[in-house]
C-alpha cells in the first residue's frame, strides 16, 4: 500500500521540480536553459516557450556523452572555472551539434578573457541556427563588439591540409577564425603528414585577411656552388717578368758597385802611374753611372711588376678563340 502511494507522490514531486527548473529565468551571463540535447528514447520536448531557445535538432552524434559534458560545464561555470566550462560546452556541442552549446561556450570564453575564442563560438552558434530571436540579437551584438578589436583570417587549401595558428590547433581547411591584432604564424601540415612552409600573416583589428595554401609547395631551386671566375694569367706573367727584371737590375747594380769601389781604390793608390790612375777614374765614373741606372731600373721594373700582378688578381679572363680563315689563323683574347 505504501509503495503504491509513494510512486504517484514521487512522480508529482518530480514533475513539479521540472516545471520550476524550466520556468526559472537564466541569469545574465549564465548558461541558457534547455541547452542539453534530448537523449535517444526520451519523449519529444514540449514546444518552446516564447523567449526560450529552440530545441536542438536531432543530429547524429553521442547525445549521452554530450549531456554529461554539458552538466560538467554548468558545474564548472557555477564554480567559477569558466575556462573548463568553455572547453566542456564546446566539446558537448561538437559531439551533438546544437547552437546553445556554442552560445554557452562563447559566454564562458568571454568570462575567461579569451575574446578570439568567444567570437569563434558566437559565430558558430549563429551559423548553426536554432537560437531564438533574443539570443540571436545578443550573439550578433557581442560578435560585432568583439570583432571591432579582433581580425578575422580565412584559410583555404587542398584537402587533407591542416593548420595551427593562434588558439586553433591542427584544424582542417577551409577555416575562418578570429585572431588578435598583430603578426600571426601559420604552421602547415600537408596531407602526406609532412611539414609545409609556415606563413606570417598580419592581422588588423576590424579587418579580414585571407591565406591560400598552395596545392604543391614550390620546390627549392637547386643552387649550384659558387665558383670564382677564372682570372687571366697574362697580367700575372707580365708582372713576374718585370719583377724578374727588377731583381736582375738590383744584382747588376750590386756588381757594378763592387767594381766601382775597386776602381776608386786604384785612383788613390800611389803605386799606380798617372795614366793608370786616370783610367781607373774614368772606369769608376762609368761604373757609378751604370750602378745608378740599374738601381733606377730596379725600382721601375719592381713597381710595374707589382702593378701587373694586382691587375691580374682582379681581372676576369676573357674567352680566347682561334679562328681559321683563308688568310691563316686568327687568335683573339685579352691580356
Image (spheres, rainbow, N blue to C red):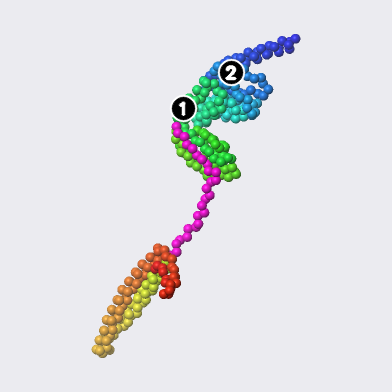
Left/right of residue 126 with respect to residue 1 in the rendered view: left
State the mark number for residue 48. 2
Q: Is residue 224 magenta?
A: yes
Q: Is residue 291 above or below residue 310?
A: below
Q: Residues within 10 Å of mark 1 (few under 14, many from 20)?
A: some
Where does the image place residue 230, in percent across and percent down from the top left?
Answer: 45, 64
Task: Please tell me whether mark 1 sits on a helix, a strand or a loop.
Answer: helix
Quarter of the image with the C terminus in it: bottom left
> Residue sitting at 58 percent across and 45 percent down?
194
Q: Residue at x 53, y 46 (%)?
A: 217
> Camera-side residue: 228 or 75?
228
Name which residue lies at 73% across and 11% down: 4
How many angstroms separate mark 1 from mark 2 (CA)?
29 Å
Q: Position of residue 295 (x, y in %)?
A: 32, 74
**Comparing labels 1 and 2, the label whose residue is closer to the camera:** 2
Residue position for label 1: 145
The mark tally for this picture is 2
Amino acid at each position: 500500500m505504501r509503495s503504491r502511494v509513494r510512486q504517484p507522490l514521487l512522480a508529482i514531486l518530480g514533475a513539479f521540480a521540472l516545471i520550476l527548473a524550466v520556468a526559472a529565468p537564466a541569469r545574465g551571463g549564465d548558461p541558457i536553459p534547455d541547452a542539453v540535447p534530448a537523449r535517444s528514447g526520451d519523449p519529444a520536448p514540449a514546444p518552446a516557450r516564447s523567449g526560450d531557445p529552440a530545441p536542438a535538432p536531432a543530429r547524429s552524434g553521442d547525445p549521452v556523452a554530450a549531456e554529461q559534458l554539458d552538466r560538467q560545464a554548468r558545474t564548472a561555470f557555477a564554480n567559477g572555472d569558466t575556462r573548463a566550462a568553455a572547453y566542456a560546452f564546446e566539446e558537448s556541442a561538437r559531439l551533438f551539434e546544437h547552437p546553445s552549446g556554442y552560445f554557452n561556450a562563447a559566454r564562458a570564453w568571454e568570462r575567461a578573457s579569451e575574446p578570439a575564442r568567444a567570437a569563434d563560438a558566437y559565430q558558430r552558434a549563429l551559423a548553426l541556427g536554432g537560437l531564438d530571436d533574443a539570443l540571436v540579437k545578443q550573439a550578433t551584438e557581442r560578435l560585432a563588439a568583439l570583432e571591432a578589436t579582433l581580425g578575422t583570417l580565412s584559410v583555404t587549401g587542398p584537402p587533407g591540409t591542416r593548420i595551427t595558428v593562434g588558439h586553433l590547433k591542427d584544424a582542417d581547411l577551409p577555416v575562418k577564425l578570429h585572431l588578435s591584432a598583430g603578426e600571426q604564424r601559420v604552421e602547415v601540415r600537408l596531407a602526406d603528414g609532412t611539414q609545409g612552409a609556415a606563413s606570417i600573416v598580419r592581422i588588423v583589428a576590424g579587418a579580414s585577411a585571407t591565406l591560400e595554401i598552395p596545392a604543391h609547395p614550390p620546390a627549392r631551386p637547386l643552387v649550384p656552388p659558387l665558383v670564382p671566375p677564372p682570372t687571366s694569367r697574362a697580367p700575372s706573367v707580365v708582372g713576374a717578368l718585370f719583377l724578374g727584371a727588377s731583381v736582375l737590375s738590383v744584382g747588376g747594380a750590386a756588381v757594378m758597385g763592387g767594381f766601382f769601389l775597386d776602381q776608386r781604390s786604384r785612383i788613390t793608390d800611389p803605386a799606380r802611374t798617372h795614366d793608370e790612375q786616370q783610367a781607373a777614374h774614368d772606369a769608376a765614373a762609368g761604373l757609378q753611372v751604370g750602378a745608378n741606372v740599374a738601381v733606377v731600373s730596379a725600382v721601375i721594373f719592381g713597381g710595374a711588376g707589382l702593378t701587373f700582378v694586382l691587375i691580374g688578381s682582379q681581372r676576369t679572363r676573357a674567352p680566347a678563340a682561334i679562328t681559321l680563315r683563308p688568310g691563316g689563323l686568327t687568335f683573339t683574347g685579352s691580356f
